[in-house]
Amino acid sequence: MSTLVYINSSNGLHKSALEVVTYGKKTGDNVTVITTGNADASLLATLGSYGASKVLVDRSVSGQDAQQLTRVIASAAESIGATTIVFSHDLIAKAVAPRLSVRLKAGLISGAIALPSADGTVNVNVFSGKAFGAVKVNSTVKIISLLPNSIQPEAAGGSAEVSEFNGNAGSTSVKVLNTKKPEGEIPLPEAELVVSAGRGLKGPENWGMVEELATALGAATACSRPVADIGWRPHHEHVGQTGVAIRPNLYIAAGISGAIQHLAGVNGSKVIVVINTDSEAPFFKAADYGIIGDAFEVLPRLTEAVKKFKAASH
Amino acid sequence: MKILVSISKSPDTTSKIAFTDNNTKFDENGVQYIVNPYDEWYALVRALEIKETIGGNVTIITVGNAADEAIIRKALAIGADDAVRIDADPTDAYYTAMQIADYAKANGFDLVLTGKETINYNGSQVGGMIAESLDLPFISQATKLDINGSTLTLEREIVGGLEVVEVALPAVVSCAKGMAEQRIPNMRGIMAARTKPLQIVAPIAVDSMTTYVSYTMPNAKSACKMIDPTNMDELVELLHNEAKVI
């Protein structure tokens, strides 16, 4: 029973990478990691602490072309005789895992939110987070794509053996003309804490207080669809049905009414705090903690309270 | 330009989600089906815009039974030229993708478009599976698509940002928000859709790779705890000690 875990190591080791290695360790004994690009071998060796015994790195592939990555991961899977292949359910997995499923004739479980159950099924999000489905794979080899923030990474110490790997990536037919990187430091789908705001903030010039609270908490910032559509905030911050779906530990929403399409993007959050002047806002029905009040007063007050708490706990 | 757009049905976004048969089947009772929004608003509309600019033909394809002809007629009313229904129950993404890939292979298309995911199974699987099966490049989650001769220029989301890429046709693209705007069919479109060709094709033999064994609903949220807007220390205390998230 060999497990292969694909990680994207192009910008260091993200928490989502540690999550999938931990997931691999908990589902199989012999965990090999496959990655591409130019990450330092010493950095990759630290994946041993999360349960990887080996790390294979194919340095011939630098981009995110799905065809090349599929060939490399398929070669790695065949070379170790993998019966389970694990991805983090990000934009790479959404392009590569389905291709790999066809190439290896391996059933794909995408959007997993938990470890496999005793009966071998894996729970996934369905109906945009409104329900869970237990999925069984009918093939010998299975591929699981795990939603970020579904399990906690567990470090136990130790080091993995890192070796260079030639996965016969072949050429790419996709020519990259330009790459734009957003400013935010914490990628939204991976963030544990998120502060979000909507039209109730009245204008982009008022986002300072959202950012101050996010900074005090160490959180990422997000927004509702109308705010992204009118250009107050960049589109990559838009959470909801047509934007990004997130499942942080804490989601704080200020000035967002909580339409069903917004909830579809955030209903996987463990704890939801809603700040709204309208006591009838539908979002309160989905919230754990509610504050009926003006975001312009509540947000700065909350920022102060968080700062006081952080100062006292250090 | 021959464009194939893969569409799927999904329950209306406001549908009540419930399950029957001991939680093994989606409860369709009272559910209104629509064309999956990503397939309709982005993939289909962009295909029509391309056709209107450079000419060509837009075929829609779905795997489903006779009842799904309502969503097919809707897509034809928006402006697709013709439709194909693979006469089978779309048991999983693999089964569905293999049917569509088989039809695409036999009929030859320059461009295959899908939505980035369906809003019921959220798998983001079918597009990539079609691409691998046809051995074509796959640009996923594209937010912009332009054609220049036989070259596509696309903008897409990647891990850590946005990428502008170029790829030669034929190719498979999954479409996300930004690519086009929703079109409401007009009366002429609805009338014309009735007589547009709809071909019914028998499925090929393929085994499903996955099975949805059962469904569960999330635990109902306990009532929202209301906090005094002047007492944010209390909220911080609850988030730390009760919810244990900070």
Image (spheres, coloured by chain):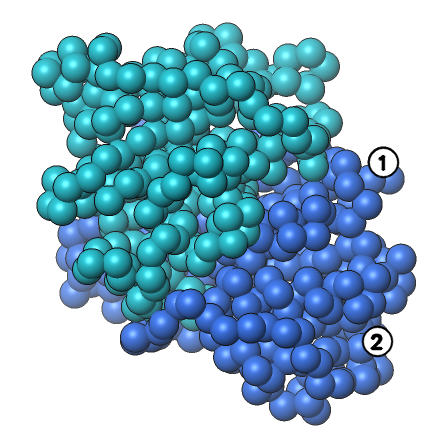
Chain colours: A blue, B cyan
The chain ID associated with circle 1 is: A
Residue at 55 percent across and 73 percent down: it is: A170
Percent position of residue B114, x then y: 39, 41
Residue B15 against residue A155 in the figure, above or below: above
Give the camera-side residue of A183 and A283. A183
Mark 2, secondary structure of its residue: loop
Mark 1, secondary structure of its residue: loop
**Label 2 amino acid?**
Ser
- Quadrant of the drawing holding the C terminus of chain A: bottom right
Residue at 64 percent across and 80 percent down: it is: A58
Q: Which residue is mark 1?
A: A119
Circle 1 Cα neighbour tier, 10 Å, few/some/many (<14 / 14–19 / ≥20): few
In this image, B60 relative to B23: left or right? left
Q: Tell me how far mark 2 sits from mark 1, CA to CA.
A: 27 Å
Count of picture labels:
2
The chain ID associated with circle 2 is: A
Q: Which residue is mark 2?
A: A53
Percent position of residue A79, x then y: 80, 68
